[in-house]
Image: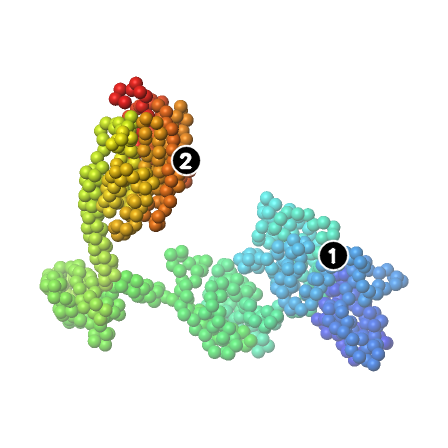
Amino acid sequence: MTTDPAPAAEAGAMPDVVASEAVLERAKGVIMALTGRTADEAQAELLRRARAGGRTLLDECRLTVGGTATDRSSAGGAAVRRAPAVPAPASPPSSGSAPTAWGSAPAPAEDANAAVLRQVGRALVRVRTPMELARRLREELAGSVGADAVAVFSTLPDGGLGLTGHAGFTRHQAARWRREPPADGSPVAEVVRTHAPLWLENAGVGAGGPARAGGPPGPWGAQAWLPVGTGSGPAAALGVLCRPVAPFGPRTRELLRSVARLCSGSLGSFDTWPPPSEDVSLPTVQAVLDALPEAALALAPLRSASGLVEDYRIEAAGPAVVGLTGLSGRSLVGVRLLESFPALADGHTWEGLLHTLATGEAYEGEPMAYPSPDADAAELPTFSVRARRLGDGLMLTWSRYEIAERQEQRLSDVQRLGNLGWTNWNLLTHEVNWSPQVFRIFDRSPADGPVPYDDLPDLVVAEDRPALRRAVDALASEGRPFDVPFRIRAAGGVRHLRAVAEAVTDPRGAPVEAHGFVQDLTAQRSAELALVESERMMLTQHGMLRAERSLASRLQQALLPLPHQPVRPGGLRVDVAYLPAQSGIQVGGDWFSAIELPDGDALCVVGDVAGHGIDAVATMAQLRFTAKGMVITGSSLTGALARLNALLLHTGEPRATATMVLARYNPRERKLVWAQAGHPPPLLLRDGEARFLKRPMGMLLGAVENPPFQEGECLLEPGDRILLYTDGLIERPSEGIDAGLQRLARAATGHDDRPGSASLGPLLAEMLEGERRDDVCVLDIRVTPQEEPGA
């Protein structure tokens, strides 16, 4: 955009103050955006308002863009700070119409666009670069327009257009669009050619179709492109891009036109492409770089408003330079450094460049791997970067490592990572060479020199010396290769090494040279020895556990024999099932009793001791025989439980716990009296229905001193069935205890069709699906009819 110089102030203005071009351009942009006037009309309006207010043109411009003005008409010449006045949008005044008061307050029902423009105008007051302008526009238009990205194309020194500012683009997208500048058919080219806005409301992949040819890369569904500037053609093109597909309404279009006019002042107030330093001739620099065989770039720093270096612009480039985007040589001129060489943003390298720019001290970085478009995927090139000061910028060069240097580096890396080193032995001159890694393996100083193969066995422990001596002698005399493990004593202890060597023979077959490697296998051998020791301990422990299981199993069978036929205490028929756990190798502490008492009553007991193994079996036997003895000698059920609780509390270490249910049946009254200690309730089946008996109070045995116990009663009828069981029957890892009880009630009802059956198989098969993690003990108690044989 070209700008006419400000004319001299007329009579009444202050001719001693000249408005700066930057402030003038921004003030003109504000008036153009808010009133729709042309650049000349906006400048005339500024002059008119300065004259009417008794201010200089500079003061009026500052007041317009949000600065301060000195009201020289105030009494005493005192400076009065004025708030910026921004009018609502208005059409250009016709000839002879009364001018709008610039300082008038907005109407109460202020237009929404005016509020947005006021905010945009304030945000653009202090922008200094197109990048800042794009970023601030995206922030201000995100809510009102839904802008996801903003692009600014400005006039280049050669007359073309280039992407000078952007926000919302990734670095790759911005680099791609710079690499493919707008061509015929692109939105930017069309706006520049027609000088008219272009609204693309179904333009990109976000609309479900292909992106418009020449358009910006990315998922932009709606795009607005507007010319910025006046005169013979636009000085720039402004793009506002949105991801969703949505039309731009009339109010939004008018707002974006005003924003574009507002930006014309800002774009005209700063230099998009700053010139190089006056003491550096870029044509000369480019000519020198063209003749250099190594890759070199001349760079100009790009600074933010705060003065920080954000990037560098390539001012000259040698033909050996190839960027990651595919551009090379002079085609890189004008491109930002980090777009083509993003690896240079590495913290150490970037800080080195900044240090050189600030101090003039040369920088030479460490070797760094860097991909290039022409490099084989398996061959990642390695470079060394150097930087020197050049005028106000930098001269950047880098050298690629040659194949031999890279192979040597790789060999060194392999030796370090594999903890091995190469050796060479001339059998004629007895000269020996070691790589540096061999000295580290043998814990030997390089100043002491390598050890000849003949003396190598002297370094190993006595047990391994004969084998290594035979191998070395056979290699030297017969040329026989060897691969021998041995041990040495070093400062850190014994090291496990491996030596591999082969001979080179002369034409007659006599060995004249030997070469090979030595490898440190200490870590691997230590791990192997630890694994062997761990396996040995596991086998020992496994054998001990199997022996314990066998002993506990035999003890359990001796103490808890299973009846082969139903037992019939007190007019009942009792079937017993006991199934040990399938997981683990230890037996559990589940147990039962079903006996007839001296008075003719029946006593049925089921218990479960916590834990497994010999301790659990021993506790089980103690509880089983003690409980029977107490009831036989006249103790009540609750009294027996209280004494058993005291027994567990005061005998044995570690302390054991157990659950138990005791049931006493009086055949004369057909009354069942029962008590429990933390055990699942009995299940009663009668006439095809199942219900659990209400549990009386009772706590786990061995938990607390003097827990309260109560008894429950139930009258039974002929044909009734009672199930006493341990928790292994109803527990599953994937369900709660209530679900297990309901599952037992359903299964027992389904398998109650044959009263008096001695088989618990179908019930157990349905309840115990999969692997059993705990023992299962079940007493199936039936009240037999009087006519049943054996009753």
Of helix, strand and loop, which one carries label 1?
A: helix
Which quarter of the rendered picture does the N terminus lie within?
bottom right
For the image, the number of numbered tags is: 2
Image coordinates for residue 525, horizontal then vertical, percent = 22, 59
Image coordinates for residue 523, horizontal then vertical, percent = 25, 61
Tell which residue pokes out farthest to the bottom in this image: 76
Which amino acid type corresponds to the residue marked 1 in the rendered image? Asn
Residue drawn at 40 percent across, 68 percent down: 367
Q: Seen in the image, is 234 located left or right of residue 634?
A: right
Q: Is residue 429 above or below residue 137?
A: below
Residue under label 1: 113
Q: Seen in the image, is 353 located left or right of residue 126?
A: left
Image coordinates for residue 46, horizontal then vertical, percent = 80, 69
Q: Is residue 32 visible?
A: yes
Q: Specify few, some or many for label 2: CA neighbours under 10 Å numbering under 14, 14-19, or 20 or more.
A: few
Residue drawn at 61 percent across, 50 percent down: 243
Residue drawn at 30 percent across, 18 percent down: 787
Residue drawn at 76 percent across, 76 percent down: 18
Q: Seen in the image, is 707 located left or right of residue 468?
A: right
Q: Seen in the image, is 787 located left or right of residue 165?
A: left
The disc at residue 694 is 2
